[in-house]
Amino acid sequence: MKQRKMPRHFLSLLDLSPAEFRELIQRAGELKTTLHAGKPHATLTGRTLAMIFEKSSTRTRVSFETGMTQLGGHALFLSSRDTQLGRGEPIEDSARVLSRMVDCIMIRTFEHETLVRFAAHSRVPVINALTDLLHPCQLLADMQTYFEHRGDIAGKRVAWIGDGNNMCHSYINAARLLDFSLNIACPRGYEPENEVLQPAADRCSIVSDPATAAAGADLIVTDVWASMGQEQEQRKRARDFGAYQVNEQLMALANPDALFMHCLPAHRGEEVSAAVIDGEQSVVWEEAENRLHAQKALLEMLLLR
């Protein structure tokens, strides 16, 4: 009996080599150009992507579902209410069954361990569409956006302002792969997890002052102060993060051609001022669109190689 090829998963940016990361960015740009030119590019005809959502989303669902359609395939939306996974079926059993029926599985969930366990028992590629630990698909789009506007990010300086959350963790991993420096400004008690930060100690620094992090930056990035599942902490977090808003004064400390990014949804007047997110240095709308193109490139990589 022919031995079955082990699937390649995308659970973290570190599942890519630096060269593969740049290849994905290049391919995403090609797919974007092809789509905008109205040219067909059905490279995944007949393939099916199962999309498991334990955390709701707008951009993730629309970008993956639209992307599969544009590539000639099909996407299935599965919420925890629609599957046995939400009724107590072991994660391992769900993985074994679903992976015999579809070609790829995308999961957006809370605990990263859930994703890891699922992938360990899947016969097909599994994509991390967000966990509490990491959000690697967003970084594919962010880096594509930076490359489009400013070229390669190697040697540049990035400032992360806010919570040391899953987005911050993924920026740390991106710094390791693409060779940029990352200044992280967060209140005490909200630092990124040491297991993620320590391997990137030569690329990253933690500071408490947002102005220090933003000085001379080529890119400034932030996220909401309270992510999904943290709403009960909103009042405390608003106090703790009050000095960490990305506003015009903070952007003025960065390089004149610095860009601003936010993974969205954004709360104007909290983590970012309206003047910044709606200003000339903001590329958040292209960043959001690029989720579509970057994830199409990722699907091709996982399913065609």
Image (cartoon, helix red, strand yellow):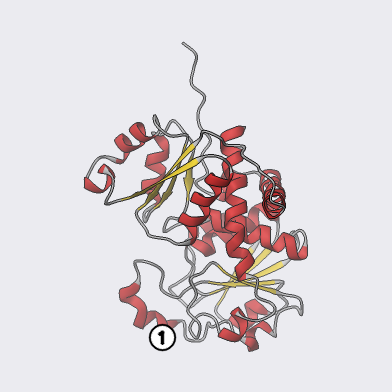
Q: Residue at x 76, y 65 (%)?
A: 150
| Residue 206 falls left or right of residue 99 | right
| Residue 296 falls left or right of residue 281 | left
Placement of 232 over or under 146, stated as above or below: below
Q: Position of residue 45 (x, y in %)?
A: 56, 35
Q: Dot 1 surroundings within 10 Å: few (below 14), some, or many (20 or more)? A: few
Q: Residue at x 58, y 64 (%)?
A: 288
Task: Say which of 280 and 243 sits in front.
Answer: 280
Q: Position of residue 304 (x, y in %)?
A: 60, 33
- Point out the residue furthest to the left here: 87
Q: Position of residue 226 (x, y in %)?
A: 41, 73
- Point out the residue furthest to the top here: 1
- Point out the residue furthest to the bottom here: 249
Q: Quadrant of the C terminus?
A: top right
Q: Position of residue 145 (x, y in %)?
A: 67, 62
Placement of 277 over or under 70, stated as above or below: below
- Amino acid tagged 1: Arg
Q: Residue at x 55, y 49 (%)?
A: 67
Q: Quadrant of residue 88?
A: top left
Say whether residue 202 is visible.
Answer: no
Secondary structure, mark 1, is helix
Q: Quadrant of residue 153?
A: bottom right
Say whether residue 76 is visible.
Answer: yes
Q: Residue at x 34, y 73 (%)?
A: 231
Placement of 124 over or under 271, stated as above or below: above
Task: Say which of 276 and 212 sits in front.
Answer: 276
Residue under label 1? 239
Q: Quadrant of residue 111?
A: bottom left
